[in-house]
Image (cartoon, rainbow, N blue to C red):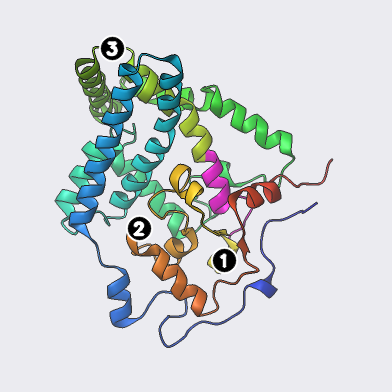
Amino acid sequence: MTTTLVPPAAVRPEVLPTERLGPTGMALGELRARYRHIAGVRNALSVAALWATVAVIVELGVRLHSPWAAAACFLAMGPVHARFAILMHESAHRLLFRAKARNDWVGTWLLAYPAMVPLSIYRRSHFAHHREEFGPDEPDLAFYRGYPCRPRDLLRRLARDAVGISGWKNFKVLLTATASAKGRSIAVPILAVQLVLLAAMWAATGAWWAYPLFWWLSWMTQWRVLNRLRAVAEHGGLEANADRRATTHVVRQHWLARLWLVPYNTGWHLAHHVDMGVPWRNLPSFHEELRRAGYVTDQLTYPSYLALWRAACSAPAS
């Protein structure tokens, strides 16, 4: 049984700065510019491919005329919501396109609003997270505190996510926001995009239920489960600390986790927190840079997400 998930100082050796990395781990000089390169054309293709994936899933879910196919397509939409969230996150960091206007337009209308998130508000709160993980302005503290816990505690939280209780709390905020002028300016565009999605899916498939089943209900339920599991894997049970290795977990990446839970290289999360200006395509190589420097050690790294979640559910019985 463990009582903390903060890695001991012995597995966090003091190796910085180096000739290539500064005192906080950021790359220096030309190397930093290389890691921070934004591949705008490739990112545009990624956004287009993501929407094509949505179209294929919805079409198959309706056209195959099978409840089993519909269930499979419903499940497949969970990782799609994860992809929308991660590309939206890239846009919030202005790492999707070099041109600010293009970055924010795509991030707002093609990623954040379909995912029912106001990008400007998300950006402000997320930057508070980066300024000081677990600090006084940490917006996601509810996701991170309380670990390690008992297995039944995590299962209870995941059950609330899976049946839509957590999702409804989020969706209800959008609905109630329309009661005020300020709230309407935020909520109405998001809800309008949802109506466009409903109409588009209905027109394309002839099934009125395509949007509520494949998009809205999957966002309300399974995406909440994936989001919580990922949040625990990123920062669960850690602490406010100047050393990012005490605020952010390191997990060895496997293809299945990258397919289902941590797409677009978001699993290399410590690298992202060491330098939040590194786009998603460059996070694996930047992580390797940190590993070669001795900043990331094998002892610090969980062998899998399952191993991390087991550790997060290993609190002594009260």
Q: Amino acid at mark 3?
A: Ala
Q: Quadrant of residue 52?
A: top left
Mark sitting earlier along the chain (2/1): 1
Task: Please give the name of the residue rendered at 49% of the width and 62% of the height, measured from the top-left corner.
Answer: 270
Q: Is residue 312 a member of the stretch shown in magenta?
A: no
Q: Which mark is residue 245?
A: 1
**Residue 17 % position (x, y):** 48, 84
Q: Which residues are magenta?
A: 228-240
**Residue 214 % position (x, y):** 37, 23
For disc 3, the marked residue is 207
Q: Is residue 230 a member of the stretch shown in magenta?
A: yes
Q: Amino acid at mark 2?
A: Trp
Per the image, label 2 sits on a secondary structure element best described as helix
Mark sitting earlier along the chain (3/1): 3
**Residue 289 % position (x, y):** 44, 75
Distance from the alpha carbon under mark 3 to that under mark 2: 36 Å
